[in-house]
Image (cartoon, rainbow, N blue to C red):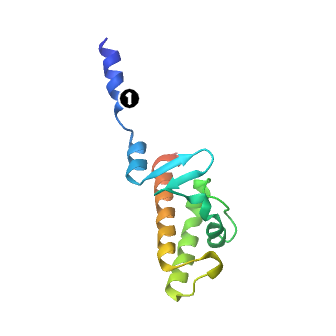
Amino acid sequence: MFNKLSELFKSNKESAEQVFLRENDMKFDEEQGYIINGCAVNELSERLIYFSNRKLSNFDDLKALFYTSILMNEKIDLEIASGRYVARLGNTQENLLEFKEIIRKLNDYYREFKRDKS
């Protein structure tokens, strides 16, 4: 009886991963992929393709995003610093900073919970 009660209370406690997802307003949907702050990030695939130099076409491969993000962040920073935004992507300083934040959240999630620790 005690074991059943203790397991019931254990299952109600959020895991560290669940806490991270809740605090960062992140979800994963089978059809849409990652959703951050209510935005399905795969809808930003055109911007991802551009900043990753066509190495990535969606946000589903967190490992590839993690290893490509340094170059992507430099390219985003350069575009912001120059003030010359790619008009066909609708880039502005505000949405590029939001894009960097999405990348940071996905990288933090990958580093903390998905990357092999070996």
Q: Please give left or right for residue 79 compared with residue 37 in the image.
A: right
Residue denoted by label 1: 11
The foreground one among 22 and 68 is: 22
Residue 71: image quadrant is: bottom right
Q: Residue at x 62, y 72 (%)?
A: 51
Q: Secondary structure at mark 1?
A: helix
Check the image and report above or below for 71 versus 39: below
Residue drawn 57% across the image and 71% down it: 72
Q: Position of residue 58 (x, y in %)?
A: 64, 59
- Where 83 falls versus 97 (above or below)? below
Question: In the image, is residue 85 above or below residue 9?
Answer: below
The answer to whether residue 23 is left or right of residue 79 is: left
User: Mark 1: which amino acid?
Assistant: Ser
Residue 112 horizontal/vertical position (percent): 45, 50
Residue that protrudes farthest toward the top in the picture: 1
Q: In x, y percent, where is residue 28? A: 54, 47
Label 1: few (<14), some or many (≥20) within 10 Å? few
Relative to 94, 31 lies left or right: right
